[in-house]
Image (spheres, rainbow, N blue to C red):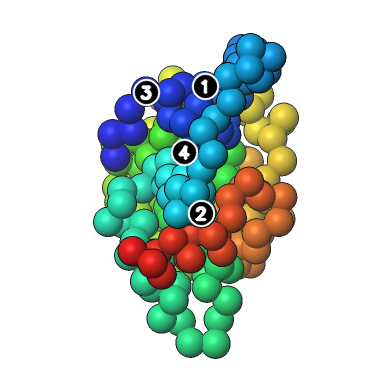
Amino acid sequence: MKIGPKYKICRRVGDPIFSKCQTTKFAIAGKDQKQKGKRRRQVSEYGSQLIEKQKARYTYGVSEKQFSNYIKKAQTQSGLDSTAEIFKLLETRLDNMVFRLGLTISRAAARQMVSHGHITVNDKKLNIPSYQVKLGDKIGVRAGSKDKALFSNLNDRLSNYTAPAWVIFDDQKLTGGLKAWPTQGQEESNLNFRTIIEFYSRV
């Protein structure tokens, strides 16, 4: 999915959802606007819900069609919490799992890594970023890709990385997967999935 100018998107949604925006420059720019009296226009309830939806879409790098399908699927799961189900569906995308395992620094890079055939699932190359990872699936780096520059500083990166509690990773074999289904907590706590559901209930 082509995203566009990331800095402008972060400013628009009021949240540093991309790594490019997670800088001192972005934080200072926001403070400068407030000091200069430049206030954001009062946003309607619909507008707030739209912004929340866009934040989630851009965070996970999915198209509008993909995202709306996730919402529909979550809402049809009888007896389950729709907000928890949406989070689970987004977090168990293969590109997101590659990111959560610490194999790369961003979801965009993880999506490219999957698309270019560097990732395997259950020992078979899989180049579909939207593949839904299941409990028991083994995610790994393709044997022919391990010596590529893409993974040259992986050990250094992993030494400073703490994965979410629901994933497991073997840094020697470069394989990992789901230890349990994802539950929202500190991970992406800036996203309000309840508000997003309310947005789709009115469109």
Q: Which label lies toward us, 2 or 1?
A: 2
Quarter location, residue 181 = bottom right
Q: Earlier in the sequence, mark 3 or mark 2?
A: 3
Q: Quadrant of the N terminus?
A: top left
C-alpha span from label 2 to label 4: 29 Å
Q: How many numbered marks are there?
A: 4
Residue 123 screen position, x and y as percent: 40, 55
Type of amino acid under label 2: Glu
- Measuring 65% from the left and 33% from the top, which residue is drawn there? 158
Name the one closer to the observer, 101 or 29: 29
Name the one closer to the observer, 24 or 156: 24
Q: Which label lies toward us, 2 or 4?
A: 2
Residue 105 screen position, x and y as percent: 54, 30
Above or below, comparing residue 87 to residue 171 in the picture: below
- Would residue 125 appear left or right of 156 to someone viewing this image? left
Type of amino acid under label 4: Arg
Label disc, if present, on residue 20 of the rendered structure:
1
C-alpha span from label 4 to label 3: 16 Å
Answer yes or no: is residue 114 visible.
Answer: yes
Type of amino acid under label 1: Lys
- Would residue 42 appear left or right of 160 to someone viewing this image? left
C-alpha span from label 3 to label 2: 26 Å
| Residue corresponding to mark 4 | 107
